[in-house]
Amino acid sequence: MQIHVRSDSTPIYQQIVDQVRHRIVAGLLKPGEEMPTIRGLAQSLRVNPNTIQRAYRELENEGLVEKRRTRGTFVSESPTRQGVRERRRLLIPHVDHLLVRAEGLGIDFDELVDLLDKRRQKILSDQELSS
């Protein structure tokens, strides 16, 4: 798992939580998938294992990962309400941006909804053709 740690003001554990959370809610990490060990991830990121442990604990508190005794940490099998809430929270800035852009271009809400529906149909059609 590729995690990039920046040297900005965001705490390292929070950067790890944010990146893992994004991968889980985006479906890049699948339910039941094993997470890297605390020690292994700490070594690859060159951080203290306590940093990884804190990040995993926060993800566990959010219901995104679960510890299995003696086996390690895994992506939760079933999406929790927090997982659904988190996906929505991640999408809200994009929706807000789209609404502001549409308003700026003089596209009313009904026209925007129609455009979204047409684009969705196109994407679904393209996905069917490619599979």
Image (spheres, grey):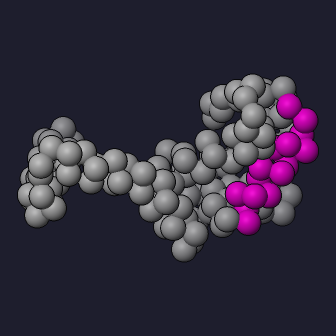
Give how far across and how far down residue 14 sits, in percent: 73, 45
Looking at the figure, which quarter contains the C terminus?
A: top left
Residue 102 point in image, percent of width and height: 19, 49
Magenta highlight: main SS: helix
Going 49% across and 45% down the picture, which residue do you hit?
28
Q: Is residue 39 above or below residue 45?
A: below
State the image coordinates of residue 99 (x, y, percent, origin top left): 27, 54
At x 12%, y 52%, the residue is 107
Residue interval drawn in magenta: 47-61
Residue 82 place in picture, x, y as percent: 58, 69
Q: Count the marks: how many? A: 0
Toward the viewer: 13 or 60? Answer: 13
For image coordinates 12% across by 58% down, the residue present is 108
Q: Give the quarter of the image for residue 69.
A: bottom right
Q: Tell me if residue 36 can be seen.
A: no
Q: Quadrant of residue 65?
A: bottom right
Residue furthest to the bottom in view is 81
Question: In the shown orientation, is residue 34 left or right of residue 42?
Answer: left
Near-viewer residue (50 or 40): 50
Depth check, front residue: 41 or 5 = 5
Residue 13 horizontal side relative to residue 48, left or right: left
Q: Is residue 63 magenta?
A: no
- Quarter the N terminus occupies: top right
Q: Is residue 45 above or below residue 131?
A: above
Q: Nearer the viewer, residue 10 or 86?
A: 10
Identified at 67% across, 65% down, the residue is: 62
Q: Is residue 23 left or right of residue 46?
A: left
- Can residue 51 be seen here? yes
